[in-house]
Image: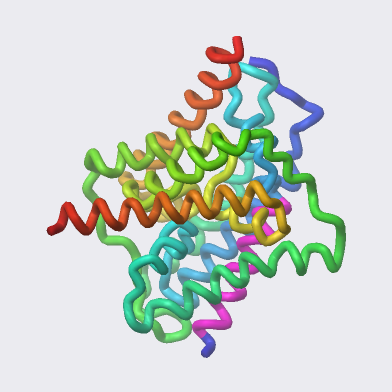
């Protein structure tokens, strides 16, 4: 393993992470809900009465974030190297997988681990491991 | 009304955190997942920072029966670790490793107007819809 010290951004990573944690805490304390993005979004696909507006508002907040950001400073780069086919396949896997596993990086990774949930710990370790393996296969095994 | 405003505010702060942390850049996410390459450990600190704040807040939240705005606390009650949980994690993690996007950052990058992020989100919604179909059929 070689650490890429030039790419390492500890302070913005920590501060950004703290903001994500703050948002999750705000949401659970004020609304009593888990800020899990796949759950918030996925719940709109089988909507129940009275269960739609808060989801839409949360997502609008998420969409507004880059625009508020841009009133202060330029957006950081978004580099998407995956091909069109790979992007579609990845989206399908992420959509199906997060609903099957009841959560993603935010619901299990941030909220679940903060709640000390063993279920979320297993989920987080599983998707992290799968992510490491997928990148290893693509970058080292296939491209080798 | 207050609940809707707080939902918007939480989404907004969440999105700002995703941008500041670097999570919205798939190249950076993949550099974190690439343990055998030139590894960028930054995202471990994103998780660390989020959980450090989260631990305090969720400890308070767990003791409450209603939220600060008076709504019911809707904390997950599921505790079982089953095949669905693990299979879902494996599929999600594989997709995450292929494109470098998880759901939140993909939505934010889509809002920035990146066409491939839009494509990813569209496919993700199809994947979620497929799950709904399969799940409904399974439940009969």
Q: Is residue A71 magenta?
A: no
Is residue B84 depicted above or below B17 in this figure?
above
Look at the image and tell me whether residue A15 can be seen: no
Q: Quadrant of residue B16?
A: bottom right
Look at the image and tell me whether residue B117 can be seen: yes
The x, y position of residue A118, in whole percent, is: 32, 45
Is residue A111 depicted above or below A119 in this figure?
below
Most foreground residue, A144 or A74: A144
Most foreground residue, B13 or B91: B91
Question: Relative to B63, is B17 on the left or the right?
Answer: right
The x, y position of residue A37, in whole percent, is: 49, 59
Q: Quadrant of residue A142?
A: top right
Is residue B113 depicted above or below A141 in this figure?
below
Is the image coloured rainbow, by chain, by secondary structure, or in one colour? Answer: rainbow
Q: Residue at x 32, y 61 (%)?
A: B76
Q: Residue at x 53, y 87 (%)?
A: B2
Q: Residue furthest front?
A: A85
**Figure quadrant of the N terminus of chain A:** top right
Question: Relative to B112, is A45 on the left or the right?
Answer: left
Most foreground residue, B91 or B79: B91
Is residue B68 depicted above or below A39 in this figure?
below
Stretch of the chain drawn in magenta: B3-20
**Figure quadrant of the C terminus of chain A:** top right
Question: Relative to B76, is A3 on the left or the right?
Answer: right
The x, y position of residue A18, in whole percent, is: 63, 55
């Amino acid at each position: 393993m070689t650490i890429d010290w030039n790419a390492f951004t500890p302070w913005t990573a920590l501060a950004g992470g703290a903001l994500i944690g703050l948002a999750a805490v705000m949401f659970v304390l004020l609304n009593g809900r888990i800020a899990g993005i796949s759950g918030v979004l996925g719940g709109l696909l089988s909507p129940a009465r009275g269960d739609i507006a808060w989801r839409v508002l949360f997502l609008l907040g998420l969409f507004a974030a880059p625009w508020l950001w841009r009133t202060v400073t330029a957006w950081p780069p978004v580099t998407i190297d995956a091909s069109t086919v790979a992007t579609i396949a990845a989206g399908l896997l992420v959509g199906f997988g997060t609903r099957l596993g009841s959560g993603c990086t935010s619901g299990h990774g941030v909220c679940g681990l903060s709640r000390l949930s063993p279920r979320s710990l297993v989920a987080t370790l599983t998707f992290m491991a799968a992510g490491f393996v997928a990148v290893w296969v693509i970058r080292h095994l296939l491209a080798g | 009304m207050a609940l809707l405003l707080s939902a918007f505010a939480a989404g907004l702060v969440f999105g700002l955190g995703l941008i500041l942390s670097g999570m919205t850049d798939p190249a950076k996410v993949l550099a974190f997942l690439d343990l055998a390459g030139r590894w960028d450990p930054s995202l471990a600190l994103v998780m660390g920072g989020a959980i450090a704040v989260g631990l305090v807040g969720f400890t308070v939240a767990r003791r409450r029966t209603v939220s600060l705005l008076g709504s019911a606390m809707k904390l997950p009650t599921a505790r079982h670790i089953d095949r669905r949980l693990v299979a879902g994690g494996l599929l999600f993690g594989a997709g995450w490793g292929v494109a470098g996007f998880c759901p939140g950052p993909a939505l934010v990058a889509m809002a920035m107007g990146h066409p491939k992020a839009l494509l990813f989100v569209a496919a993700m919604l199809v994947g979620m819809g497929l799950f709904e179909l399969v799940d409904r059929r399974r439940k009969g």
